[in-house]
Amino acid sequence: MADRADTLRFLPLSGAIDVSFLTELGRRKLHEFKLSDAPVEIRGTFAPSNHHEVASPLCVSADAFDSGGAAGVPPSLCVVPGTLINANTLEDFKEWDKAELLRKAAAAIWQDMCSGAALAEPHRLCRFLLLTFADLKTHKYYYWFAFPAFALDPPPRATPPAPLASLLDASQLDALRRGYAALPASAHGRPAFFAVRLSCGSAGEPVQVAEVGPLSRWLEWRGGAGGREQAWIALCDPSPQHAGWPARNLLLAAAAAIREASPAAAAGLPSEVRLTLLCFREPVGGGGPPPAAAGEGPREPKSAAASTLYNVTMDVRGLFGGGGGGGGGTAAPPSAVGWEKNSSGRPGARLMDLSAQMDPAATAAAAVDLNIRLMRWRLMPALEPEKVAAQRCLLIGAGTLGCAVARCLLGWGVKAITLVDSGNVSYSNPVRQSLFAHKDCIGGKTKKAPAAAEELRRIFPGAEARGVVMGIPMPGHPVGAAEVDGVRADAEALDELVQQHDIVFLLTDTRESRWLPTLLAAARRKLAVTAALGFDTFLVMRHGLPPPAEEAAALGAGGLPAGYEQAAPAEAAAPPPPPPPRPRLGCYFCSDVVAPANSMTRRTLDQQCTVSRPGLAMVASALAVELAVTVLHHEHGAEADADVPAEAARAATCDESPLGVVPHQIRGALSFFRTDCMLGRAFGKCTACSATVTDAYAARGFDFLLDAFNGGDYLEELTGLAQMHREAEAALEDVGFFEDDEDEAMSE
Ligand SMILES: [Zn+2]
């Protein structure tokens, strides 16, 4: 036997990454790891090889991250603990000190070998490292496996592998399989290493499988029965030929255990260790007896890998530090190897490029999501991109402002965008209105709202964009008898749309077209954001929310809108004094002392369209979206009071959102390149948002709207504005020197 001994060869393990692992790695990188490259405990699995040429790889899939050991792993698989290091950059990945990583992992294994822990808990013998870099923008994943194993020098020698079937008869092979299948799985899954005790014949040949047990029994069995028994160490072998890679550490651990168990007499330590290694390559069922046990005889497909047996001789003098005394725990570990070779046969990383497999629409959605989330990593951990992206936005107007607001919303990941407009795309539009092109102008019949929605979906397939062709009924635009039904349908549809959305952007180009959306947003308590343009000036503002209905009732009809109180706890015996009411912010109409009227009559061409500096709409639209996003991040949301930046800067604590101050109005003038944040309180006689108006709408619905549309002084009389005017004029008449004063003023 010894004369035929040859160097024992080991087939390296190969790592296989499932796409599901990379998907999960990407998800965790984005949501959990962020910039951390700290080691993460993962797990891989392998099965004994079941093909005479094909090795079983060590596989990692999405469940590699599952904590809790082997939970959920099929009982036919062996679990291998691993350590994942996900580098932050490709440079980090390349420059990572891989030798040091391997050395540390090997040192831990060595420690377990020398302490005896490795035989008691054999999962400690087989570990893996996985170094990765996930390029989430391009869907390229770089990875490199290492399977730390000790360099055995001099290499162990072994007899040529003997097929197990040539040593044991079918019934004994079956007994071995069943014995292994019956081994209890630990928290670390099915043991990859185990021990077999056999009874021997008169010539010392193995005859009968006496016992299959955990690896920890091997040393005890080895010395038993004075040559009438054998004890084998065994591994579930992923390799179809030679010995599998995990056998290297198993052999060393076994040799260490023999040294440790030897009498500590000065010269008594063996310089050579002999042992029998079983490379077990049998199918293992789902925990129960394998199919062969059903009485139909072992099924051995021709291509199946066969278990083999090696008689191994190890020269251990060089392995345990100069052949000195026992207590190998003090010796330095042998050098370790194990970084995997790549497809070119050299140690090197591998790359999995998933970009071609990605659905382009899904890729776009993931990339948009990624861009927004990246803001959280370093710049804005408090950002709530999901909250922003979940907003349903209603854009009244699909012109210059509407197009720019929609595009900015896409940038924030908002998907649900509905545009309302009755107009057609005209030849002047595409150069300023970013969702239209020249082709949309030809024929003059392309409706803006659906064309804009279609373009949003073309830009970002994940957009749930909708275009609604609808005119906005306006005060001062009388409704003829024939039009009443159509206007009623439009008003009801608009109310429905407001209720279906979270934010209403008012982006039309006349004052009176903002009236009904303002009223509806107030009536339905939705955040409304207005953007309005002059030639070189703009206004961006958010409308204050009316108090909730129950508080409005408590304040009494018409008792608004000075403010409202926070609800007092109902169970309080003596109600505490209510906190000071939070002042309500005004709407677009609150600072007006006249009701909206038809502004389109008697206007020259340049007055009928909004003629403004081309960049102005972009500036105002961007501010409108950013204002809405900032408000969303405030703890009071749309009910947040306004910060005035100058005051906020002075105050030690200011009530701002994580994104900064939440102003009420932003007024800008390109002629000075300046913007100012301003504050305007809600006006009790406002023709659009006062309780008088919303109550009238609640009570009379479309009939009320019709009165307002038909104009006259209806709204001014209703809200008391008309009375206020009369009182003001009377007061001036009483004073008497109005005329003189005016003359004086004009003469200066
Ligand atoms: Zn108002």
Image: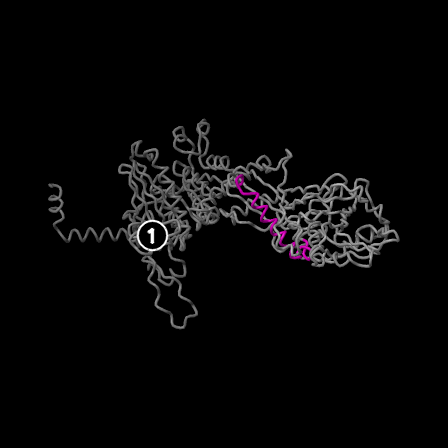
Determine whether the residue tagged by mark 1 lies in a helix, strand or loop: loop
Give the color scheme: rainbow, by chain, secondary structure or one colour. Answer: one colour
Q: Count all numbered tags in the image, as a single digit.
A: 1
Q: In this view of the protein, can residue 321 be seen by the observer? A: yes
Q: Closer to the camera, 642 or 116? A: 116
Residue 100 forms part of the magenta stretch: yes
Residue 605, quarter of the rendered image: top left
Locate the N terminus and report the quarter of the image it occupies.
Answer: top right
Locate the C terminus and report the quarter of the image it occupies.
Answer: top left
Helix, strand or loop: magenta stretch: helix
Q: Name the residue under label 1.
A: 642
Task: Find residue 238 and report its horizontal and vertical position in percent.
Answer: 72, 45
Q: What residue type is labelled 1?
A: Ala
Q: In the rendered view, would you say 427 is above or below 519?
A: above
Task: Find residue 189 and report its horizontal and vertical position in percent.
Answer: 68, 54
Q: Closer to the camera, 717 or 58? A: 58
Q: Residue furthest right?
A: 202
Residue 244 forms part of the magenta stretch: no
Please indicate whether residue 637 sits to the left or right of residue 285 in the image: left
Please indicate whether residue 658 sits to the left or right of residue 364 in the image: left
Please indicate whether residue 199 sits to the left or right of residue 98 in the image: right
Q: Residue furthest bottom?
A: 573
Task: Find residue 554 and report its horizontal and vertical position in percent.
Answer: 37, 63
Please indicate whether residue 468 sits to the left or right of residue 696 in the image: right
Task: Find residue 723 and report its horizontal and vertical position in percent.
Answer: 25, 53
The residue segment tinted magenta is: 93-122
Q: Closer to the camera, 380 or 65? A: 65
Residue 356, quarter of the rendered image: top right
Residue 558, quarter of the rendered image: bottom left
Q: In the rendered view, would you say 604 is above or below 161?
A: above
Q: Residue furthest front?
A: 267
Q: In this view of the protein, can residue 700 be seen by the observer? A: no
